Amino acid sequence: MEGDSSAHAHTAQVAAAIHPYVHYVHVRLKQKGASELLALTRSMVNRGVPLQQIAVNDRVDVAMLTSVGAIQLPANGLPVMDVKSILPEGTRCGVSVHSLEEAQAAEQAGADYVLYGHVYETHCKPGVTPQGLVQLERISRLLSIPVIAIGGIQPRHIHELYTAGASGIAVMSGIWEAESPVAAAMAYKRMADRVVHSL
Amino acid sequence: MEGDSSAHAHTAQVAAAIHPYVHYVHVRLKQKGASELLALTRSMVNRGVPLQQIAVNDRVDVAMLTSVGAIQLPANGLPVMDVKSILPEGTRCGVSVHSLEEAQAAEQAGADYVLYGHVYETHCKPGVTPQGLVQLERISRLLSIPVIAIGGIQPRHIHELYTAGASGIAVMSGIWEAESPVAAAMAYKRMADRVVHSL
C-alpha cells in the first residue's frame, strides 16, 4: 500500500485483524509527532478498520482530518466543550481521568465516557481489594456516563471490574504485547461476553 | 482577569507588552498539554495581542479554537496540505525546517514561510563563517517563500542574516530571558529597521 511501508504498517495490520473483537481501537503515539499519528490512523483506515471504531488520542486536528468516530482526551488535553464545538456532531468524546473529581468534571463538561485508571497499577497484597477497584466502583456509581477501566487488565479481572460497575475495559499491553494479539483480543472478548451474560 | 490567574498570566502580559515591536508572537509550550497552550493563547488575546499577530505551535486544533493568524508546524507536525484543508483561508502556515531538503519540501507543500535554524547553534571559530549562515544563504536563494532565521540570534547578527537572505528573524531566549523583554524586543526591532533601510 502506498505511503504505508513505514513502521506503522505492522501496527495497522494488527489493528485491522483485531477490530472484529473490540469496540474501539485507540490510536496513541505519545512520544511522536502529529504527522505520524495521522499516518498511522490513515493506515488503519486503509487496511479496513472502520472509522466508527477508531478513537484518536489527544489530537482533535487529526480526528478532524480522518473523520474518526471518537477522540480520547488526556487529562491535560483540550476542554471537552471546546472539542465538541469543532468536531462533527456524533463524534464520541472520551476523557482520561485518574480521580472522582476529574471524572465528575469530565461528565459535567459533556464527555460521552471516561477512561479510568490505572486500576491495577499497584501490586497489591493478596486478599486486599486493590484501591483502583474501590475507586472504580465509586466513580461508576456516581457517574451516569460509561466508565471504562484501564491499566494492567487481564481477562481474569473482567468479572470484578464489571461487578464494580465498569461499562467496558481498555487494554494496551495485554493485547499489543501478546504473542498473538488476535488470540488475546478474542480471549478478552470471550470473557467479557460471558461476564455480561452472567450479570 | 478570570481564568487568567495561572502561571501564564505573566507570559501573556509580556507578550502584550512586546507585540508592538514584533510581527508575530509564537506560542509554544512543547512539554505541556494542549489545554495549557489553549489557555495561554486565550490569555494573550484577552490581554490585547491581536489575533493576526499570534502563531500557535503545532496544534491546529488550538489554532482553530482561537482563530489566530498563523500556525507554526514543527518538522514532525501535520502536513501543510492537510492543515490548509481545515484552517480558514488566510491563516498563515509556517514550517520549521533544518535543511534545504526540508525547506524545499515545505515550499512545495504550500508553506507560506519557513523557520530555519538553528543558525547560531554551534560555537564556531572566530573568522570562520558559521555553517548555519552558509545554509541560510543557500536556502534563501533557492526558495521563493520567506525564510525566517532562528537560533541564538543577537541584534548584532541581524545584518549578516539579512545579507544572507533572511526575510526575518525569530527570537526566543534573546527576548524571553532578557531582564527587560520589552527593551530587548525594541533593540532587535531598531537594529532590524536599520538593516532593512541600509540594504
Image (cartoon, coloured by chain):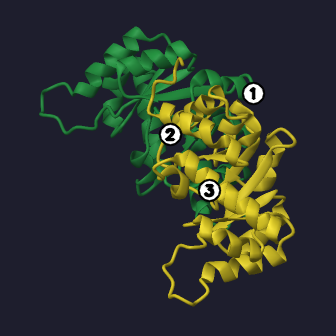
Chain colours: A yellow, B green
| Extreme residue toward the bottom, this view | A127
Horizontal and vertical percent for residue B87? Answer: 71, 29
Q: Earlier in the sequence, mark 2 or mark 3?
A: 2
Which subunit holds the residue at mark 2? Answer: A
Q: Secondary structure at mark 1?
A: loop
Given the image, on which type of amino acid does mark 1 rest? Pro
Which residue is painted at 45% across and 55% down in the image?
A: B180
Q: Chain of mark 3?
A: A
Decide if residue A28 is in sight here: no
The residue carrying mark 2 is A33
Q: Residue at x 21, y 28 (%)?
A: B130
Residue B48: image location, x then y, percent: 70, 48
The x and y percentages for residue B140 are: 39, 15
Q: CA distance from mark 1 to mark 3?
A: 47 Å
Q: Going 43% across and 20% down the picture, which residue do you hit?
A: B103
Discs 1 and 3 lie in a common subunit: no
Q: Residue B197, image x and y in percent?
A: 44, 19
Image quadrant containing the C terminus of chain B? top left
Q: What chain is tagged by disc 1?
A: B
In three-dimensional space, the C-alpha distance between marks 2 and 3, rounded to whole angstroms, equals 33 Å
Q: Is residue A166 above or below residue A66?
A: below
Q: Which mark is residue A187?
A: 3
Picture disc at residue B88: 1
Q: Residues within 10 Å of mark 1 (few under 14, many from 20)?
A: some
**SS assignment at label 3:** helix
| Kind of residue indicated by mark 3 | Ala
Estimate how packed mark 3 is, as few (under 14), some (14 to 19) or many (20 or more) residues with alpha carbons within 10 Å.
some
Q: CA distance from mark 1 to mark 2?
A: 23 Å
Q: Mark 2 is on which residue type? A: Gly
Q: In the rendered structure, are the residues bearing label 2 and label 3 in contact, judged by CB atoms less than 8 Å apart? A: no
